[in-house]
Structure formats: C-alpha cells, structure tokens
Image: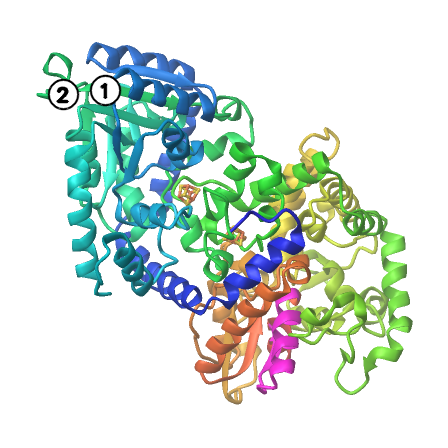
Amino acid sequence: MQDATTLTEYKNQCQEALDDEFLRKAMDAFAKAYRTNRVNAFAGINEKALIAEIAAAKDGAISHLPELYEEFRVKAELAGVHVHLAKTAAEANEIICQIAKDNGCRKIVKSKSMTAEETLLNHRLEADGLEVTETDLGEWIIQLRHEGPSHMVMPAIHLSRYQVADLFTDVTKKQQDSDIEKLVKVARRELRAKYIEADMGISGANFAVVETGAIGLVTNEGNARLVTTLPRVHVALCGVDKLTPTLHDALRIIKALPRNATGQAITSYVTWITGANACATGPEGKKEYHIVFLDNGRLAMAQDPDFRQILRCVRCGACANVCPVYRLVGGHRMGHIYIGAIGLLLTYFFHGRDKAKNLVQNCINCGACKEACVAGIDLPRLIKKVHARIQDEDGHALPSVLLGKVMSNRKLFHTLLKTAKWGQKPIKDGSTGYIRHLPMIFGKEQDFRALPVVADKAFRDEWPEIRPNVDNPSYRVALFSGCVQDFVYPEQMKAGVRVMDGHGVEMEYPMGQSCCGLPLVMMGESGPARDVAEQNVKAIDPAKFDYIITLCASCASHLKHTYPRMLADDPQLAGMASVFAEKVIDFSSFVYDVLGVDKNDFREEGGQGKTAYHSPCHLCRGLGVTEAPRQLLRQSGLNYAPSAEEDVCCGFGGTFSMKFPQESRELLHKKLDNVKASGAVELVTDCPGCVMQLRGGTDVRKDGLRVRHIAEALADRKK
Ligand code: SF4
Ligand code: SF4
C-alpha cells in the first residue's frame, strides 16, 4: 500500500487496518501476552536503575561518536576488517554494491537488519542484478510478499499462518499445511540451499564494541550465524549509534534488550565476531569482511541537545508493543520503515517530513512508550516536538492557528466559552446535560460518545460564593481548574472543595488562570502553548502557596513537566516556573498523602455495587501516581473492583479524539468492555477529559454505568 499523502488518506488507511479483523485479534493477543511476559522477565531486576544506567552510558557514547568510530576502525582494521563510513543511505548502498562487484558476488543471503531496511538496500542490490534472500523467517515472508516490516523485532506479526501457508504454497509450487512447525520446516529447507549457494552474507549489528573491534548480534533463529559464517564475503551494516565503548556496556544492554523486546531473559543466540575469520574459499584463506557504518543524519542528531536521546534506541520494539494506537492499526500504519513511537521520530529524520507528517499526529500522548523504553527516551514529548517542527516547516493548518490565537487570549477564550452557553440552547438536551444533535462541524464519526454542554455557571463565577473560610490554615493552596472543569464540569471542582473542606486548607482560585495549554501542544502550536504557560505561572504566584492543586491529571502532568522546559529560556520566569512545577500536585495525592484522609472522613455504610477505576495516562505514567486514588476508593467505602488494563488509555487524548475518532472509539469501547466484565456499576477516574470520554461513551452505549470524577465520588461519601 502506498504511503498516504494527505491526513484524510492516512485516516482511511487506518480505518482499513481497524477493519482487518485478523490484524486486530493478533495485535490484541500479542499486546496482552507481552504485558505479562515483560513483567515476568524483569522480575527481580531494578528496571528503573537499569534504564538509567543504559541511558547514561549511551549518552556518554553519543557525545563521542566520531572518536569512537576512529578507535573502532583502528582496532577492527588490525584484525583484518575493512571499515567504511557512509554519509548517506545511498552511499552505504553504493559501498556494498561495490564490495559485491569487487568480489564477484552474485548471490547474497541477509539476516535481519533495520539499517538495511532504512537504506532500502535490497532494491539497490537487485537493481545491480544481484539475488538477495532474507533468511530471518519473518523477513523472508515479507520479502516474498514485497512488503515492509510491521514490527522491528517481529516483521510479519500482521500475518496469519494461513496467509503464510498460501504464500509458501505459491513459492514451493506445492500445497503447504498451515501448521506452524511445518511452515518453519519449509522455510528451513528452502533457505538452506540459499546459504550454501551464497557468496556474500549481509548482517546488521546490535553493537560495535570499540575496545575489541568486534560486532555483536542478538538473534533468535540462528540464521545470522549462517549468514556471517558460510559465504566467503561478510558485510555488516549498522548505524554509527551502535558504537559501544566497552563489552560491559553491551552486556548491560543485553540484560534489558531481549526482556523488553519479547519478554525473554536472553535470546537463543548472542554472537560476537572479532576480525576476519578463517575461510577456505576466501582470499588467502580468510573471509573478506567489511563493516559499513551509516551516518544518515546521526552525527548531526548527536549534536542536538534534545533529539540526541533518540540515538540511545536499542531497537527493542517495546515502544510499539505497548502503544495503544499500534495495537489498533499495526505497524504499516504506525510507521514508515521504523515503526512504533521511535518509528514516528526516525521517519522524520531518516525519511523526511512528507513521510512523517501524518504519522506524528497519530499519537495520543499516553506515555506508555516512554515508560517501557529501556533507553529512557522521552518519546511522547519528542513526537510532539517533531509535530510542531513539521508545522513550522510546512505551515500551520488554519484550525490549529485559530485555536492557538483564541486560547492564548484568555479573555477572548473565556468570553467565547461563556457565549457558547447561549449558542448551545437549540441543541442542548435539558434532561441529560448532553448536546442533543452534534453540529455538522463534528461530523458523523464523532457520534460514538455524547458530548456535554457548557455549564450554566463557570466555576470561576461560583467561587466567591463557595470559597470556604478557614481560620489558622495548615496549608495555603491555589486551585487550578483547567478549562474543562471551569466551564463544563464545575461540579467536579466544587466536589473537590467539599472533600478538602474541614482539613485546614485555605483555598484560593486565582482568576487570571486559563487553559493549561496541553491541547495546543497536541495541535503542534508550541508558540501559543508557551504563551499560555507564561500567563498561568504569572497568574498563580507560586511563592504565595504551599501547593497548586489540580483535579485534572492531564493539566497536572503538563504543568509539572512541561512548564519548566517551555519557560527555561526566560531568565525572569525560569526560576518561577520550576517552583511552580514543584508545587503542583494532583487532587488524589494531596487528599490521601498530604491531608491523610481516611475512612474516618466517610460515612460508615458501604457503597452500592462495585466501583471500577480508570487510571488516567497522565496520572499513572505522567506523575507516577497509582496508589492514592485506589486507596481513597477503599477508604471511602466504595466497593472497588479492579478491572483489566486499568492503566490503558481510554482514547480521549484531547484533540486526538477529534482528529482520529475511529481510533478513539475503539479504545473507548475496549475500556468500557473491560469495566463491564468486572461487574462494576460505577466507574471513577481522576481526569475531566477521561470523564467526558467515558461518560459520553457509556451514554451512547446505554450500558447503565455511572461515570464520575473521584472528587464527586468522595464528596458523596463524606460524612
Ligand atoms: S505516547 Fe502513547 S500513543 Fe503516543 S506513541 Fe507513545 S505509546 Fe503510542
Ligand atoms: S525507543 Fe526505546 S522502546 Fe522503542 S525501540 Fe528504541 S529502545 Fe526500544
């Protein structure tokens, strides 16, 4: 399938993937099994410490890539290796074609190499009349189908054994059984002859160890050993980012790589090749051995203070394995050649913005990839940064520019929201609080969830009347509502105030605050997003408060993590923004960890029916808060019933759900199905965006589930 040129085309392709029942089932089964296998594989290992060590070691190497290359070259050449450095993909391909020509090679066997996929090496070799055979089973299958990989580690994950049996029947001209073991035997039989006939073997390399001049290969099928051993010529192609100072550094990565890739403690084969080995058919009884290092923008990337961390990637593929969007649409739609979260980034840098411009928008910013990355790469943030960069290079879309202009002007934005209260009257359903008929601008595809109307009175307008008077306060706090709780769900804020009331908390609601700016980041509008951050930091002087409390998980994570970075270059605001960020706390953590609210605060009689919990992405991964809300549910006497995949995204993602409604709907249904299976009659969460998605979805499905913000559930149970 051709790469989409427009967003509409891309969305249509995603829809086709969503309609592919086999793909959906396969990806779903894989995602579930992977979660369990990964947890088991890391049992007993301090994963966070290991990730930090890998990141630090990789960063050290990234700072010295030219020096490491030189040192490696000298070591490897002493051991009889020819070492090349290719500036571009085309140059790498030319070098390899020339090696084939110089050595009279006609037939080539290859083991898996994402770098060779990156350079489109096979096409170039075949253009020179060379016969190239992929020998990794998955790679061979997709080569026969003339497709690209749909996963970096499992390239044919999108195919069923029946499709593979049909393919092998065509290739062998003999009917083949769909039994997997039999199919593997067919591949083995067909490929063995290719190894014997080949005069050149091409491999990748997971490591180029500088202290020894060796390369390391981490594989499961053993084909790489045959590829690098049998033919008289061996060419290893790898990115310069694979230069690793010591064997110890490589072994540290090996401790994490297979665990993160496939949930294995170790792969079946780990191969180290140092120098040109003996080879009866090679010149002077030695193998002709070349290592081609590929730059293709990596050395420039190593100089970029922000994007250089991309070079830490060890290509484990975990950022795809845990990605809810990848799980829905698969790798051919969630990447170009490299797939998953890292694929969205590498596509921009290696294959250009035309290939990346649609892909980078298909990220819901759930943070699952960042949490799973063994190299500690801040993937979601960098994806948003690339999106913003593409907008700057290509021109901003008009709706996105308008949104930026409106949201960065607080008075205009709030006036429009207040005016909407009158404008919505003809479409408002008075009995439910939902919009009865979605206006045309939303389109039919948005009807998978009911949308709420703007509240009659904003929280800011109610505040002067409801503000509690507190004598001798223990804490002075500022409330940050975000725009949804201010204008759509003020009752959530009021419930939060009620829960905290009586605990010596003096609350203030600074009126100069506005939207947190996250929707602007999601739209790639980094300038207006920064303006909004500045307004909020100035509106809520952190020096006056012990805490800045927000009942919105997305606002909390954005205020805490993004504001200091966005304002770091302003000498007047940088310090204030860091203090501001330090004082930001989510509602559940403040109530449970700081105020120490427990069962004594709540009525004794138990709640009615079971209560499920949805853990918002920006709370559990963004802020690392997992226990406080669940403890509060237990303490309050609500009958908390855990459900499957509580921490998987509900599909909201702010503007994502408007842009990719088909994916948003699927994620929502998966979430509601899991809640239903738990037998819960109520679903509680900590984010107004999630409430909007989940409550609107359950209303359309009519499955009788009550959805509330945790503040509402707790306020209801308060004595
Ligand atoms: S943030 Fe979530 S949706 Fe985006 S790439 Fe990472 S895992 Fe996928
Ligand atoms: S970005 Fe991280 S999780 Fe993704 S492939 Fe690279 S190392 Fe693995």
- In the rendered structure, find residue 343 and report the number of the disc placed on it: none
**Magenta extent:** 689-709
Task: Look at the image and tell me whether residue 206 can be seen.
Answer: no
The amino acid type of the residue labelled 2 equals Asn
The image position of residue 68, as x and y in percent, is: 36, 17
- In the rendered structure, find residue 277 and report the number of the disc placed on it: 2
The image position of residue 413, as x and y in percent, is: 85, 56
Placement of 344 over or under 428, stated as above or below: above
Q: Are marks 1 and 2 in contact (CB under 8 Å)?
A: yes
The secondary structure making up most of the magenta span is helix
The image position of residue 358, as x and y in percent, is: 62, 48
Residue holding disc 1: 289
CA–CA distance between discs 1 and 2? 8 Å
Task: Look at the image and tell me whether residue 673 can be seen.
Answer: yes
The amino acid type of the residue labelled 1 equals Tyr
Q: Look at the image and tell me in which quarter the C terminus lies.
A: bottom right
Nearer to me, 678 or 711: 678
Which one is earlier in the sequence, the residue at label 1 or at label 2?
2
Kindly identify the residue that appears in the image at 82 percent across and 79 percent down.
Answer: 428
702 relative position to 67: left or right: right
444 relative position to 131: left or right: right
Task: For mark 2, give the secondary structure.
Answer: loop
User: In which quarter of the view is residue 72 placed?
Assistant: top left
Kindly identify the residue that appears in the image at 44 percent across and 81 percent down.
Answer: 677
Q: Regarding ligand 2, which quadrant of the image does it lie in?
A: top left
